[in-house]
Image (cartoon, coloured by chain):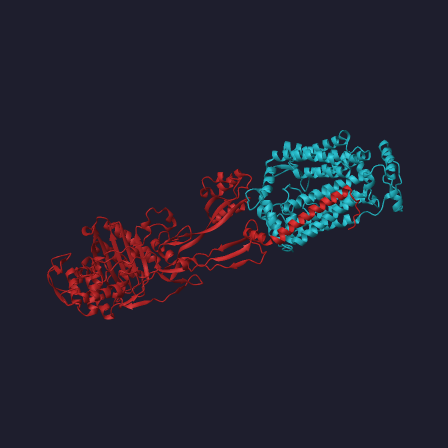
Chain colours: A red, B cyan
Amino acid sequence: MKLELQQGSRSRILMGLVLVVVIIYIGRLFYLQVIRHDYYTLQADVEQLKSRVIPAKRGLIYAMDGNTPVPLVMNQSVYTVFADPQIIKNDAAVAKVINEVAGGNTRSNFESLLAKKDTRYQILATKLTHMQAEKLKEKNLLGIGFHEETQRVYPEGTLASQALGFVNAEGNGNYGVEAALNERLSGIDGQLRTVTDVRDVPLTIGDQNIHIPAKDGDNIVLSIDRNVQSYAEDALKRGLDKAGATQGSVLVMNPNNGQVLAMANYPTYDPAKFSEVQDAALFNNAIISAPYEPASVIKTFTIATGIDRGVITPQSTYVNTDSIRVYDATIRNAYPGLTGTRTMQDVLDNSLNTGTVTVAQRLGDGTNINRQARDTMYDYFYNRFGLGHGTGIELANESAGLVISPEQQEGNAVRYSNMTFGQGLNVTMIQVAAGFSAVVSGGNYYQPTVVAGTLGEDGKTVNGKEPRIVRQSVSAATSETMRTMLHNARQSVNYMRDADKKGYTIGGKTGTAETLKNGAYVKSETVGTYLGYGGKDTPEYVIMVQVAAPNRNLEGGLHASPIFTDVSNWMIDYLSIPPKG
Amino acid sequence: MNQVRTPAFRRQGASGEAPSKAVPSARRHRPDMQILLYMGLLMMLGLVVMFAIGPQRANGLNAAMGEDYYSDTYFFVRQLISIGVALIGFAAMALIPFERIFALRRAALLAGIGACLLLAFAALIGWGIALNTGGAVRWFDFGAISLQPAEILKFGILIHLAVFLGIQARKGKIDDWQETLLPVGVIVAIAGLLVIVVQKDLGTGISVLSIVLAMLVAAGLSWRKFGVIMGAIGIGGVLLIATAPHRVDRVLTFLQGDQTSTSNASAYHIEQAKIAIGTGGLLGVGIGNSVQATGYLPEAINDSVFAIMGETFGFVGLVATIALFVALLMRLLKVMDHLADYRLKLVAAGVFGWFGVHVILNIGAMIGIVPLTGITLPLLSFGGTSMLFVAAALGLVFQLSRYTTHGSVIKEADYEGSSSRRRVRGPRYAGRRSA
């Protein structure tokens, strides 16, 4: 460009000025755009590129309703309302609308939060329902945004709450199935990395965008039957009230596949309001996490061991003197007076401690609970019946309990003599009921489970899992013998026999456990347990009941058994089991 | 009016056109088409930018408003309309004989002052036509169109002072405090009061100052006087900055190097502008791929359009853009240099000052070399008023470019008494003034 400006003229000076500025500017641009390009690209990425998690939907939890899955735990969207105070001009008008739509959900000081004009993010209200959020969105308030969150809802209320557990604010399962199957329920979160605009709306610009869809969690179907569960909970409450007890549990299992049909505990809590629970102990499912000494119900296992080893038959006899000496200890019967020659059936019927100690002696050399006897008992109790270690049921916080091995010094003869009638060991109800199921239903120990499978694609069927036989606990013959003995034992008690539905094989064993206080057994507080089965010829269900209260003598027969009877009779109807002949 | 045949005319030869009454037709020749060319290219570039980032901007506004008010092409179409209006302004100023325009110089100045006063009054009584943006009232809002009265004032000052200073310079009184500099100072002070103090618009104030200073320099003001004036402006500037918190903020931001702080608005603005420019690299991210335009960079289509262009077109694109601006400025200087009539020369000088200061301060702020002043990038920024008045000013220079002499006339002007041309010009003014 030929400008022909006059040499030394003022236009020349102005032109020079412009050119100097332009050279500086172009130099600066070269610095910013070429030399510092990578730096600013990084700065831009930091600001523009956002990774966000696409949350996987947490799986729902279903119970069975007969053969149909019904939801026990569902998801519900709740909304958090937030504001950018810098954008909002008319605080009062916005506050008025929010109060109108979501008055109950607002934070108490949200109007003062709106006034914080130097901030750009303030949460105004939480846990709005979908309806409330939609209403608020319709108002088109400038500078107001929504976060969607999911929370668990419980269409059946408190039903099976301790088996279910809950989901905490961080979205993790606590207790129960929610915790044990947290991974399967959670699914796998997806990822979205994308360039966004200033309001975080994803843009299609750029080549660094990633999109991995979320894999939603499994919808789990529990083996728990809502009807059985509901009835068990009601029956438990009724029985406790009647017995004057304050806490108790009912466990109903199918002994032919290990599935838990109901696990009821009292007291319990409302999982929808888990955050309001004061005493965290309420979250515990006593059936799996509170090991105790179930006392005489364990005699079932002792006698089964003896029969399976061939050292006794139901008609084997011993001489009962109401006490028996084991080294430096003397074992007495709880209900003395039945002295003389007694059969093993008598031992079971009358819960004779001396009888089960005799069985243990016969497992050894006949007079001592020697190492061989103890090893045999330990093999049956610990290995075959699954006492004293976790069953692996799909519930969190399962306790192992304790069955002391003969290897240990504490595993001596006195200990094992006590163990024959259910003292000196700590076991959970699920351990006992699962072992008992094996004893009465042919000898096979099924893996105890609360999960029937996953929900099918159609939402109506269950992709069931096969029952798993863990081991053969006792022979089929022993099992049949035990069934008969337990049936006879129940028949021997008039009030039990009379209360049972006629035409069915129902059997069981009581247990009344003294509690340990300050290292000594006290008679002033006892825990009552009843453990039994029912069916036409073979067991269709196993029910274990436990009742307790501070400073109360609660007995297996008088207090636990009526609850068993109640549930048992109802189960026969519910399962439509035809009576014999 | 006396018609005077000048040596310049004799050199160029007579055109075939009929002599006009107001304009010495003998001096008319083809206008400087390059002015039109560069202006047109810059306008088209602006359109491309609006086309490229309009959708993002519309999306952003729609998301914020929660409505579908802005279509993807809203800003493109608006800019197209602005350009249409601006071209009409350009054509008017290019075609209406400049003497007629000059005759309205007092009216133009008074109209500018009146409009600013009306705006201040409207703001005071809360009249709806006064648009409040971010705590400052700078715009009339007439619904479909809005207007910035300071632009009228700027134009009025340009014409009025060009003629006034042209006459004074002709009389050799450009350095006279009493007869020249004081009246100019009063007008500038009034404008400064209306624009900087009342409208809190430092950018337009600087723009006015630049127009006047460029005219004074072109009119041959002695460097000593120029130094005194600059000193006074410097003191005034410090006072102005010190009395307005947002200006202190801008200057501090600038001085502190604006590293990564997003705590205050200016630091954020400059940082985002630099990110936009820096990400552009050598060749830019391409049309439609600007991310900074999606809301990160404030005023993306207005004051910050240069930064967005940097992101979109890269270093090469920005150098080309700057080259267009420089070419246009050089044409203005050439026209100024080759105009014999001081009034006309000073119009060109004023437009140079106006255009130049906008380009330099806007780009300088975007690349972090000068503080933010909230000044538009002429012909590229979105907005009708700025575009219209800049185009009108260029239109006037375009008309004046028909009256340039072949060679520079600065020499004669600077070296008094050595030119015969000076002698013949003298009576022309004398005659006109008496007419």
Total of numbered circles in the picture?
0
| B133 w.r.t. A251: above or below | above
How far from the left and from the top, in percent, is residue B21? 87, 39
Quadrant housing the C terminus of chain A: bottom left
How far from the left and from the top, in percent, is residue A37? 60, 53
How far from the left and from the top, in percent, is residue A406? 21, 63
Q: Relative to B257, is A24 on the left or the right?
A: right
| A360 w.r.t. B221: above or below | below
Q: Is residue B390 visible?
A: yes
How far from the left and from the top, in percent, is residue A53? 49, 55
Q: Is residue A96 visible?
A: no
Point out the residue furthest to the top here.
B178
Q: Nearer the viewer, residue A450 or B103?
A: B103
Q: Nearer the viewer, residue B53 or A238?
A: B53
